Amino acid sequence: MIKDYRLTIFAVIVFTVIIIFGIKGAAQQHVKIEEQSSYLPLPLEGTSEQILYRKGYTVSYNKDTKLPNWVAWHLTAEHATGPYRRPGGAWHEDTQVATPRATIADYRDGKWSRGHMCPAGDNKWDADAMYESFFLTNCCPQDANLNSGDWNQIEMACRRWAEKFGDIYIVCGPILFNQEHETIGPNKVMVPEAFFKVVLCLNGEPKGIGFIRKNTDSSRRNDLYVNSISEIERITGMTFFPSLPKVISDSVKSLANLKDWDQNLFKHR
């Protein structure tokens, strides 16, 4: 009788522990999901959109343009560097999206480079993340000098900001200004007229900043391209960081001061 009683008590304890850890695990998963949803733009209206979740970023893919509408990621200080390098063969087409889709053949004439949206440099922390950064759904036709010049400078500055502040949230993508657009390759991948990038930091005093760069080889100083997040929302028709409390959202979206981010992190040529 005593033995059965002890077994019953033991079973109750084990069951209680399972419930507690199960609830804790569910809560952690909920926090993770909520965190991710907080920095993704609102769904787009009247625009083709397929959401693809990667290890290092999330992409809204447009089957009509064969481009991402936007790419979003949370860049931490730990993810700003790492040992992993670009994979063999580098770029590869994304079989998770329907054909016709961008392929290596579309870029063979060499007029436009393959420009990362979420850069490989932000994915050195993990081999799978690095590999996924080379999907062509994370790529746009980009002027080669812009790709290796001003756009790269902004990317490097973001990594330094992540290290300085602890973490930042980034959304970037192409801008299609014109009614008709140049296309490349047999799959007619559209060539953007410009690119946008918005950055949010919630550590310390919350702040936001945005950049717009025309898809040309100009190498002007990046601080001449600073825009508020609100202005980039107006230009793109997108809503960034929709889960922010209104008092914070109004502040970080309406103001953009490069001095708040340490403009010396830019290496002006």
Image (cartoon, rainbow, N blue to C red):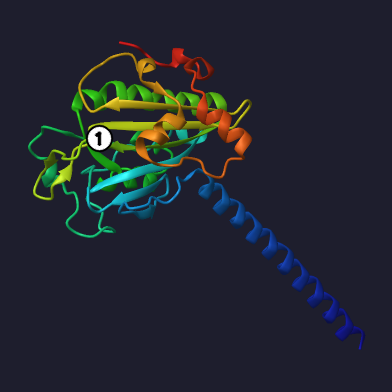
Location of residue 40 with respect to 112 vertically, above or below: below
Location of residue 149 with respect to 54 vertically, above or below: above
Please say whether residue 118 is visible from this viewpoint. Answer: no
Element marked by disc 1: loop
Q: Residues within 10 Å of mark 1 (few under 14, many from 20)?
A: few
Please say whether residue 177 is visible from this viewpoint. Answer: yes
Location of residue 188 with respect to 217 vertically, above or below: below
Rendered location of residue 224, percent (x, y) = 36, 15
- Would you name the residue on which mark 1 appears? 177
Residue in the image at 50% along x and 43% along y: 39
Please indicate whether residue 240 sits to the left or right of residue 134 in the image. right
Residue in the image at 55% along x and 53% along y: 33
Rendered location of residue 128, percent (x, y) = 37, 48
Which quadrant: the C terminus?
top left
Q: Quadrant of residue 51?
A: bottom left
View extreme (right): residue:
2
Q: Nearer the viewer, residue 85 or 58?
A: 58
Residue in the image at 23% along x and 18% along y: 218
> What amino acid type should be assigned to the residue bearing mark 1?
Phe
Rendered location of residue 64, percent (x, y) = 22, 52
Rendered location of residue 75, percent (x, y) = 48, 36
Q: Nearer the viewer, residue 46 or 266?
A: 46
Please indicate whether residue 207 sits to the left or right of residue 52 in the image. right
Q: Nearer the viewer, residue 26 or 194?
A: 194
